[in-house]
Amino acid sequence: MFISMFGAVESGVIYAIMALGVYLTFRVLDFPDLTVDGSFVTGAAVAALSIVNGVPPVLATLFALLAGFIAGCITGLLHTKGKVNALLAGILMMTALYSVNLRILSQPTLSMLNETTVFNQLDTLWSMTGIDAVLNGLLSVIGLDRFPSTWGIVIIMFLVTVVIKLVTDFYLKTEVGLALRAIGDNKRMIRSLSANTDNLTIVGVGISNGLVALSGALIGQLGGFADVNMGIGMIVIGLASVIIGEALFGTKTIARATLAVIGGAIIYRMIVTLALRVDFLETGDMKMITAIIVIFALVGPKFIQMRKEKKRRQQKRQELSVQSGGRKHA
């Protein structure tokens, strides 16, 4: 069980980068961007092709981020300059990216198992620290007999994700970031202040898909392959992470909201891992599990709010009846 949960946290931290990208479009820009399903694969495909052709893994990962940014900018251009509906622009770009990704890979699946990835390099550096032995020793003290092969990936990726979160928080508090947030709240108002909403939207969607592609590149290297179908349903996973995080941790400030997204991504992976341990569920049921999680995350808070509102009204009626009864006796 511990090893399964550890693997869920490990992948959840990487998926959190993708969830931050989804948060930027769906919550900050109020832009329903479905490019995510394609740009996630684009990141994995560009990274895989670059690594196979001898490009250093870190540079290949940065190429993937740039490719995702370009894909997002094209979606933004379709919407702002081409006047295409935001939802349709995302669908069109997602559809086009399937063929683009297939061209990049030249085959449905491209393996990186025999190549040096960024995680191989991290393992080499991490093994020199000796921290694994210390942490596994602590686990043995509390009675666990199975240990992770390395703690390096989860710790370093957690630090990377936190850095991305902090940069995102800072960016959204700058003048450009505040304008982006204003576009999501009231585009007409920010346009009346002579702000170029088209360019801001293009950059915002580009940054979002850049983060998604970065996550795809890292997930591809973690799994050792890039597959043309690995992005199917990724937008639902991103939304699930955002919704779960917001429901559990709240969204009073930007810093809290982005932290909630990271927490939501990790919790989502843990829920899926636990669900797949149920006997009658199989790996093929993962999309159904995701849909059910999103439904509960959407309906649950509203149901709880309705219950609270109902109790509040009942309490108010009781107070009014007591007050009216007191007046009659007087």
Image: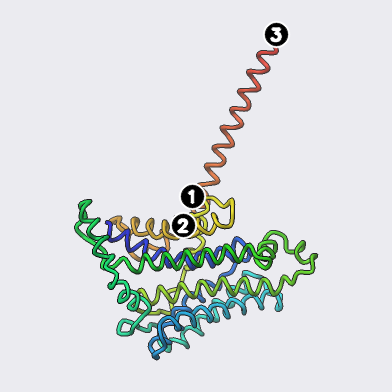
Q: Is residue 42 visible?
A: no
Q: Is residue 101 visible?
A: yes
Crowd around label 1: few <14 · some 14–19 · many ≥20 (10 Å): some
Task: Find residue 248 and name its label.
Answer: 1
Could you say which quadrant of the image residue 207 lies in? bottom right
Residue 183: image x %, image y %?
A: 69, 64
Quadrant in which the C terminus is drawn: top right
Q: Residue at x 42, y 60 (%)?
A: 288
Residue contact at pointers 1 and 2, CB within 8 angstroms: yes
At mark 3, the secondary structure is loop
Q: How many marks?
A: 3
At mark 1, the secondary structure is helix
Q: Give the residue at mark 3.
A: 330
Q: Earlier in the sequence, mark 1 or mark 2?
A: 1
Task: Find residue 264 and name its label.
Answer: 2
Observer-side mark, 2 or 3, equals 2
